[in-house]
Each structure stands twice: as structure tokens, then as C-alpha cells.
Amino acid sequence: MEDFQQDIDRCLEVLNAGGLILYPTDTVWGIGCDATNEAAVSKIYHLKQREDSKKMIVLMATEREVMHHVTQLDLSIFDYLDTVTKPTTVIYEGVIGLAENILGEDSSVGIRICDETFCKHLIKRFQKPIVSTSANISGQPTPSFYADITKEIINSVDYVVGYRQTDDVPKEPSSVIKWDNSGEVIVLRA
């Protein structure tokens, strides 16, 4: 196993207490919290100075988790996701069991099954979905790696993960798609 057990343990303490973490994902570094905790989600909106009408992404570790939270699921979406090479967030409708303030008016939310080792371990250990939103103030550029994250963000979270802070390969946000009722992919962000 990778050398991030101490980071996982500290993240779990913070997430369980309703706090915010700064952590590496399969895309860019993210600000995260318990996606089922409305107060924690509100803290992220406040930190990012973001309107709560602009929704955030939720990370899950497995297809089973997605099936647990999405009531109107076309299982063929998982076949499609097996074919993509870039991390892909899917906008699902009929989502249940998440904080109300993370859901769109139609009870939709963007969910990505995260395949990055650290995130996958963290989500599995936490046993709940985790919010992931880029580590920047709303409207500012998305940091490509840890070194680009402002002190304002770093100093405003409850725990900063040490793992992968020295990565120097720039990362990009995920693709975002919507799966319509006929099984067609609508690309919202390539």
C-alpha cells in the first residue's frame, strides 16, 4: 500500500467532524467534505465564495455506491465509462442520500467514480461520498497542481494532505457528461 495511511486517518477525523480537507484526486486537487453533511457543504460554498446554485462534484469509489444514490440509473452508463480514458463526471438525476444543498433543482448531481489510489482508499474507508471541487476561489483559475494552490485556500481548510504535494505533472478537470433517457451522451465539458 502507498505511504498515505496517516493522511487517510487524519482526513477521516476531519470528515467525520464536518470539516474540510484539501486533497489530491484523479484530476486536480480538491476541497472536500462529507457529501451527506449540509453544514460541511455550506462551508465549501463559503470558502470558495461561490453561489450555492453552482453545484459541486461528488466522488464515489464504486459503481455500487452510484447505484445506492441514483434512483433513475441506466446501467449501460458503466459500460460507457469503461471506454473513456479521461476521468469523467456524469450528471445523474434522481439522486438521494446526499446533502440537499449539493443537489440541483431536479435532484441532480455530478458524480465521478474515482480511480486514483488515495481517493479510492479514502472514500472506501469513509464509507460515504466525498465532495470534490477545485481548490480555488470561484472565478479564479483552477490550479493544475498543489504548488498553484493559494495560501488563502490552504489556510482555510482543516487538513491538507501531504501525499502527492510534490507532483509536478499538471492536472486538468474531468470531462462532464449527461446521459439522456435514450442512452445518448451529451458532453457538457470535454
Image: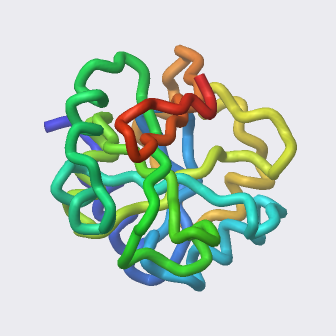
Q: Quadrant of residue 98?
A: bottom left
Q: The C terminus lies in which quarter of the figure?
A: top right
Which of these two is toward me, 132 or 76? 76
Which of these two is toward me, 40 or 160? 40
Q: Is residue 139 left or right of residue 126?
A: right
Q: Residue, x 63% and y 71% (percent of image)?
A: 105
Residue 38: x percent and y percent? 55, 82
Residue 33: x percent and y percent? 50, 67
Q: Tell me if residue 42 can be seen.
A: yes
Q: The N terminus lies in which quarter of the figure?
A: top left
Q: Tell me if residue 6 can be seen.
A: no
Q: Is residue 154 left or right of residue 184?
A: right
Residue 150: x percent and y percent? 77, 43
Q: Quadrant of residue 145?
A: top right
Compared with 56, 141 (above or below) is above
Which of these two is toward me, 56 or 8? 56
Q: Residue, x 72% and y 34% (percent of image)?
A: 142
Colour setting: rainbow
Compared with 171, 69 (above or below) is below
Q: Residue, x 20% and y 49% (percent of image)?
A: 63
Residue 136: x percent and y percent? 74, 46
Q: Residue, x 21% and y 30% (percent of image)?
A: 79
